[in-house]
Amino acid sequence: MRPSRAGAFAPGRVNLIGEHTDYNRGLALPFAIAQGITVRATALAGERIHAHARDLGEEDEFALGEISPASGWRAFVRGTVGELAVAGVAPVGARVEIGGDLPRGAGLSSSAALEVALCLALQALAGHPERSDDPLATARLCARVENDWVGAHTGLLDQLASLCGQPHMALRIDFSTLAVEPIPLPLEGWRLVVLDSGERHAHASSAYNQRRLECVRACELLGIASLREASSDAVAQLPQPLRDRALHVLGENQRVLDTVDALQARQLDALGELLNASHASLRDLYGVSTAAVEAAVRRLLDAGAAGARMVGGGFGGSVLGLFAPSGSPPEHAREVRPSAGANLL
């Protein structure tokens, strides 16, 4: 019997290290955070979805059998309903309330949190709560929403981090196998903080998709399926800017491995150096920084951060900083800790 109500919460994420590696079948080390998106759905008679984004004060309404394209947050709702139907879950007419405490466009994966919360709530309302037990299938469905309905050609990093997060743990994700391994994140008095650059970003309207196409072209020239298979010698022969894009991916994969080693050895000062190296690579080789992001990085470092780097796809959003126990983050920096993943309410 279908329930009359269902709800879900999905957290945002901070990617400790491993940026722009997911769609290159590389490695990443994200963790879920406490802030996120909540979706509450109430069954209604009829074949229509009535959606309300509380923080925006905006609404949307559409028929289940006639889902036309839309933009902004509406594309996520419509896309999730459409992809659930394709996946064999027949969505029911519903009133959908969307809220949360995760800022949009801040590089903390509000898009993936929205997709995941919508997916879990709507499939539970349709009588399929058991589907929430398959995080990989859910992540893939949500990625299709973002790729095909929203127009951002992202990988699976954000969705898997939101779905699989654990308290006190980062997640080592190998995107060549999609294996997810919890890695203890022993801060021991050290603090991770995020500082908003004040510059909003959106994957679909930024140069994010162009970076992905450049990686595809690099693979074509090298005759390989993904940059995970590339060697430094081969990459050195690529024309620019493809050479720099590939060099970033190779270096970032190694930094993920080095970060895991540093965490296991409880060498938090080494983690700071890796954050700095990751940011320099994202800025100089991958070309995804901005003046506002650089200013935020400088604020953290000037305040005494052991390391700082942009998080997310770049072109704005937030910056991550690591502070020693005696350090004092700047005003408006917000501490983040590894938290639990998505769940039904």
Image (cartoon, rainbow, N blue to C red):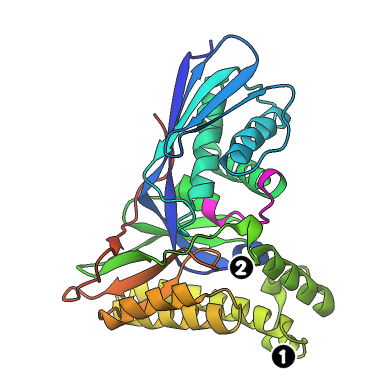
Image point 60% across, 83% down: which residue? Answer: 285
Q: Position of residue 101 (x, y in %)?
A: 36, 44
On the image, numbered disc 1 is attached to which residue? 236
Determine whether, in the image, residue 115 is placed left or right of residue 13.
right
Relative to 301, residue 316 above or below: above
User: Which segment did they paint magenta?
Assistant: 149-158
On residue 292, the disc is: none
Q: Position of residue 220 (x, y in %)?
A: 83, 73
> Does residue 267 show up?
no
Number of callouts in the render?
2
Report the Cα–Cα distance between label 1 and label 2: 19 Å
Identify which amino acid the numbered label 1 is placed on.
Ala
In which image quadrant can residue 222 be found? bottom right
- Closer to us: 4 or 26: 4
Q: Quadrant of the image for the C terminus?
A: top left
Q: Position of residue 137 (x, y in %)?
A: 62, 41
Q: Position of residue 334 (x, y in %)?
A: 29, 60
Relative to 88, residue 73 above or below: below
Q: Residue furthest front?
A: 57
Q: Main secondary structure of the magenta part?
A: loop
Determine whether, in the image, residue 28 is placed left or right of residue 103.
right
Identify which amino acid the numbered label 2 is placed on.
Gly
Mark closest to the chain's N terminus, 1 or 2: 2
| Circle 1 SS class | loop
Image point 45% across, 18% down: which residue? Answer: 5
Q: Is residue 179 magenta?
A: no
On residue 26, the disc is: 2
| Circle 2 SS class | loop
Q: Is residue 150 magenta?
A: yes
Label 2 packing within 10 angstroms: few (<14), some (14-19), many (20+): many
- Closer to us: 259 or 98: 98
